[in-house]
Amino acid sequence: MKFLRRIYELNNKDSSFFSLLIKRIALVSISIGLFSVIISSFVLDGFKKEIKNKIYSFSGHYDVSSYSNGLSFKNSPLNLEVGIFRNYSNHEIINSVYPYILNSALFQGNGKNIEGVIFKGIDKNYINNIKPFFDEFNESLDIESSILISNDLSHKLGIYINDTITVFFPNDPPVFRKLKVKGIFSTGLEEIDNLVAFGDIQLSRKIYQWNEMNASGIHVFVNNYNDDVSSIDKLKTISNYDEYIQSTKSKYIQIFDWLSLLDKNVIIFFIIVVIVACFNMLSIVFIVIMEKTNLIGTLKSFGTRKKLIYSLFFKTALNLSIKGMIIGNLFSLIFYYFQKNYKIIKLDKINYYLDFVPVDFNIYNILLINIILLIMIVISIYLPIFFIDRIRIINSIKFN
């Protein structure tokens, strides 16, 4: 076997320029293709993680409200003395719950600009969930006299941190309040930034004249969330008859559909990369076999077994493929490190919900991509190798 390998290596040194060029092209194409797919996986996982984290932080995994709210324009209170809020501590699926109250409101800043916004009354504990998304935050927050607004609303009203804002609640009778801006957040999600401001839940109760055990709804955070029907079924076992349970994913269906579309795009791109890589390996092996026809005939004349001849060509193509995959993986990890730590690639926040390209490392996805690509390349290498059986000794000696 060593003797045959030596003969093959010596003969390999005389490979034509065209053959060497094809090998280099195949090496580069496999490297670039794998690099592109892995980077796409990093970015897709990063996008999904960042956007889902924002949505779930502001809205919980599930939203519980009163069935009556869907039947009229009147905001009917949810009774917290019964149902999920009362029983959640005894249920292993629930991590935490946060009541909230929604009020329609008009905001006026220092000028004449007026903006219609939903005033969302929350308690102090809920602020810890959304705190990471604040551009500015006054640590001496007194929720009773404060309001938290989005960066978009801040610019529209000309109101900034520690400024006073006038809030008008169109109730009967109307209610006016002057509140101090103690936090400015930015999510990049229009559904939140353009519509919602956060304040004290006690103020919301006073406006509606509700008691301590009334709320518009409850944000529910569950353990090991995976958005399956069984989770809602489990929540229903401790809910009251008047409680309507809705997943946050269904409330933001357009955003989640967009994320699902990204998944499909990456899969299609990966299929294209695999096809190109397999085609390259098929071409390389065919070219090498045609170029080494004389060598194949010589080896056959020595009585060399087919498997040994196959292995010479197989190992050459496989080594080339593995080198390309190693280079592709190495450069993708380098990209991941710099993008994760330095955010070198920026985005338009209006169109992409984020101002940078997020990346997230998922070892299982990377292994799966490499394994599938390697399997398909191995299959594509084997196919042309069987062409060696058709090469006859007499014809191979005459072949130039």
Image (tube, grey):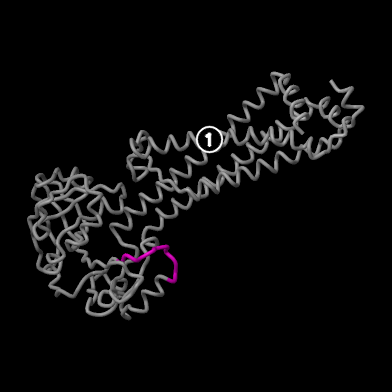
Q: Residue at x 34, y 72 (%)?
A: 92
Q: Is residue 64 left or right of residue 298?
A: left
Q: Is residue 85 above or below residue 354?
A: below
Q: Is residue 157 above or below residue 205?
A: above
Q: Nearer the viewer, residue 81 or 376?
A: 376
Q: Position of residue 154 (x, y in %)?
A: 18, 45
Read off the magenta span. 220-230
Residue behind mark 1: 328
**In the image, is residue 222 part of the stretch drawn in magenta?**
yes
Q: Residue at x 18, y 45 (%)?
A: 136
**In the image, is residue 151 part of the stretch drawn in magenta?**
no
How packed mark 1 is, by other alpha carbons closer than 10 Å (few <14, some 14-19, many 20 or more), is: many
Q: Nearer the viewer, residue 285 or 156?
A: 285
> What is the quadrant of residue 195 in the picture?
bottom left
Q: Residue at x 88, y 34 (%)?
A: 303
Q: Secondary structure at mark 1?
A: helix
Q: Quadrant of the C terminus?
A: top right
Q: Quadrant of the N terminus?
A: top right
Q: Is residue 247 above or below residue 397?
A: below
Give the amino acid type for the residue marked by disc 1 in the picture: Gly
Q: Position of residue 397 (x, y in %)?
A: 88, 24
